[in-house]
Amino acid sequence: MNFGLTEEQQMVKDQVTKFAETQIKPIAAELDKTHRHPEEICRKLGEMGIMGVAVPTEYGGAGMDTVTYVLCMIAISKACASTGVIVSVNNSLYGFPVNTYGTEEQKKKFLPPVSGGKVEGCYALTEAGAGSDAGALACRAELKGNKYVVNGVKRFITNGNVASYCVLAATEDPAKGYKGVLNLVVDLKNTKGFSIGKIEEKMGILASGTAELVFEDAEVPVENLLGKPGQGFRQMLSGLDAGRIGIGSQACGIGKAALEDALNYAKERVQFGKPIVSFQAIQFKLADMATELEAAELLLLRAAWMEDHHLDYEKESAMAKMYASDVAMKAAIEGVQIFGGYGYCKEYPAERHMRDAKICQIYEGTNEIQRVVIARKLLSLR
Ligand SMILES: Cc1cc2nc3c(=O)[nH]c(=O)nc-3n(C[C@H](O)[C@H](O)[C@H](O)COP(=O)(O)OP(=O)(O)OC[C@H]3O[C@@H](n4cnc5c(N)ncnc54)[C@H](O)[C@@H]3O)c2cc1C
């Protein structure tokens, strides 16, 4: 067993950490306040290869591994959780299914703009009636000649306000259940019948847009279908396994930011004549936060390593996402507590970390659903 990083992994981690600390962290509070999509940061991360870390270079990505992706996601999300989820969606939710299930032609056409970081991608699964029950899709894609005619509304789509391309999960026929699910790549800027609906007002990750995508007789060429009809549900599940590593890493980064800020504050804040960090009550909180976040990081790196080695990592990615987001939430709450009244005010980033951490327990499958996935595996039900 080797816990060390390769030279390349260490180099990319150092580069991305430096970029995140110097270019992203200083504007994170402004992004949170203005809800502005960090366009310039996304383009720069694209130039660094970070919008398609594990996508092969011939399709515009960086051709690196999932372990490197975890390291990048933690560093970026520690600086700004909103930027973290934008990066995660481009890599995992858009890049992974197109790279894994696309034909050579589809990969050449649909990967370079997003994985090369010129524009944003998104993944549209959730609907008003299909959240945790992802198989209950109502958005319909009917084959008419050489086109799918799409009708339906997708909810809560990250990057939906800005994305140029989308992997859209729809059903050929709701009566077919899971077997009717298919995934289509949609060129959102050039598809008649597509429009952006409501933009959500949220608790956290405020610089990451969350939008409704509306399809009204939208025509999508049949050659944009990923794989074959009937394979869509499996593709969706494997895409979520990959995505959970990204969201777990986002959570881990947020937790690490909460820990670092709380540690620094506790060294400076003086009460009863000494820095509050000298009180054992504060030290124990910091010790628990650090231990749990390091355990989360190890779970994430293990799941990533398993993905890189083509092993079944469904249980491991669910465990990593669930644990990382639970301990990040706990760390963010403890972070606010260590800041006392100042933690509740916007002058310090502690309250932002708490608002940002919460979503990681909800999206990419709620943590209740992660426990369902883990228990199913333990009971060998699937
Ligand atoms: C900011 C944000 C960004 C998002 N980005 C995307 C995106 O890019 N693409 C996309 O497709 N979706 C996205 N989503 C949707 C997200 O993945 C869903 O909100 C999430 O999967 C939960 O679905 P739901 O909201 O319908 O909750 P529900 O499924 O209605 O769940 C409500 C509660 O019931 C629990 N529950 C449900 N079923 C079970 C069960 N079988 N056992 C135990 N408990 C259960 C849940 O855990 C939860 O606590 C996003 C959501 C948000 C808020």
Image (cartoon, helix red, strand yellow):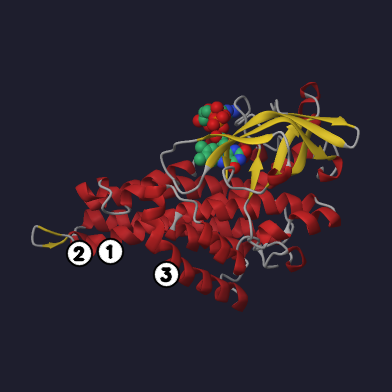
In whole angstroms, how far apart are the C-alphas of marks 1 and 3? Answer: 18 Å
> Quick check: can you spot residue 4?
no
Q: Amino acid at mark 3?
A: Thr
Give the residue pinned by disc 3: 22
- Report the mark closest to the observer, 2 or 3: 3
Q: Please indicate whether residue 362 sits to the left or right of residue 307 in the image.
A: left
Is the CB–ligand 1 distance for label 2 below 8 Å? Answer: no
Q: Please indicate whether residue 78 sits to the left or right of residue 176 in the image.
A: left
- Say which residue appears at 70% left-offset and 25% top-offset: 138
Q: Describe the element under mark 2 as helix, strand or loop.
A: helix
Q: Position of residue 237 (x, y in %)?
A: 70, 41
* Farthest left residue in view: 273
- Say which residue appears at 80% left-offset and 50% top-offset: 101
Dot 2 or dot 3: first in sequence order is 3
Taking 297 as reference, is 64 above or below it? Answer: below
In this orientation, which residue lies closer to the viewer: 316 or 251? 251
* Crowd around label 2: few <14 · some 14–19 · many ≥20 (10 Å): few
Taking 232 as reference, is 293 above or below it? Answer: below
Q: Position of residue 341 (x, y in %)?
A: 20, 47
- Classify residue 126 by image quadrant: top right
- Asked whether disc 2 touches disc 1, contact meaning CB atoms under 8 Å apart, the reply is yes
Give the residue pinned by disc 1: 264
Give the residue pinned by disc 2: 268
Q: Amino acid at mark 1?
A: Asn
* Crowd around label 1: few <14 · some 14–19 · many ≥20 (10 Å): few
Q: Position of residue 151 (x, y in %)?
A: 72, 28
